[in-house]
Amino acid sequence: MKRIGVVTAGGDAPGMNAAIRAIVRSATYNGLEVIGIERGYAGLFEGRYRILDRRSVSGIINLGGTILRTIRCEEIKTDEGIKRAAEFLKSIRIDGLIAIGGDGTFRGASRLYRASGIPMIGVPATIDNDVAGTDTTIGFDTAVNTALDAIDKIRDTATSHERIFVVEVMGRRRGFLALEVGLAGGAEIILIPEIKVDLEKVCDRIKRDREEGKVSEIIVMAEGAGDSRQITEYIARETGQNVRLAVLGHIQRGGVPTARSRILACEFGYKAVELLLTGESKRMVGIRGSEITSVDLDYSWMTEKEIDLSRHRLAEILSL
Ligand code: F6P
């Protein structure tokens, strides 16, 4: 093993840069050369890459986004694309590739491994935290805190104006972010794709709240739980209350990574290089409790990650 590649793909997540730094510094410490593939998997088709030496990753541990950039790439999803990308990796003499991203990124990496035989290691980084085989992902903690900060501010207005706020957070398919943020923010109601949304029940809860003297409610919903605009209108109509919608959007994907996201990135990056050096060829790095572990790369995207629904119940009880 002489030369390894690193790529960031899928949606950006705070801490990706800290992971790139950790990979480059761990690899150079072990005498490896590192190539950074630019613009996600698109760089494999465009021939865009650059050498990353120790100094090239100075001052990035605290930066959101990814210095390598990440473009949504459709070509990598096709058989022809995989063939071309595998050929390109061979042509630049890559002995191993570390892919930083989410389940889509790992699916691509896994197919690239089968087509090229080049070892592939996944480093989970997504604010959705929807990757099986790891308790948490790089960027998740930062996104939770960003959304929480917004919700705390929204609550000031909700209370002052005796309003209901529907706050839509990211999570196209899964509700990890909404659940975490909802519990931490003291939300009265949390709507996630994993639990069938029952708007009648939501309205009953609000009516009961008001009878019992509550003056405002925060409803945190994952974007994948339904149409937030329609839900807001329905609740306003059925309860007769003043309801507002706040869509937090992409502010949740950016910003300075928290200490937790950075430390995870440091540990994951180091472990990824270690896995390549010990001859592993298709793994994803993860964390279980406080232990840095790894699972088969295919497990990460073929398995549906379990969500802890007891937290949903807990949030409901604690916000009564
Ligand atoms: O990074 C994952 C995610 O944040 C999803 O929760 C969201 O639906 C999606 O990315 C939106 O990303 P984009 O705007 O890049 O398509």
Image (cartoon, rainbow, N blue to C red):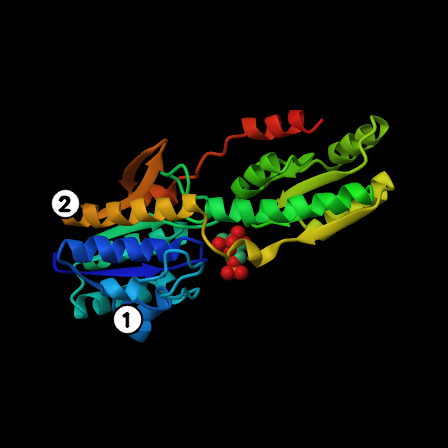
Residue at horizontal 45 percent and vertical 48 percent from the top:
258
Residue at horizontal 15 percent and vertical 49 percent from the top:
277
Residue 43, given in percent of the width and then of the height, sits at 33, 70
- Cα distance between the residues tagged 2 and 1: 25 Å
What is the total number of numbered labels drawn onto the structure image?
A: 2
Q: Which residue is mark 2?
A: 278
Q: Earlier in the sequence, mark 2 or mark 1?
A: 1
Residue 18, given in percent of the width and then of the height, sits at 35, 54
Residue at horizontal 69 percent and vertical 52 percent from the top:
246
Pointer 1 local density, CA inside 10 Å: few below 14, some 14–19, many at least 20: some
Left or right, 277 with respect to 141, comes to left
Residue 120, given in percent of the width and then of the height, sits at 24, 53
Q: Which residue is mark 1?
A: 49
Helix, strand or loop status at disc 1: strand
Q: Is residue 138 above or below residue 201?
A: below
Left or right, 313 with respect to 237, comes to left
The one of 235 and 66 positioned closer to us in this rendering: 66
Residue 170 seen anywhere in this rendered image of the structure: yes
Pointer 2 local density, CA inside 10 Å: few below 14, some 14–19, many at least 20: few
Residue 117 seen anywhere in this rendered image of the structure: no
Residue at horizontal 69 percent and vertical 50 percent from the top:
228
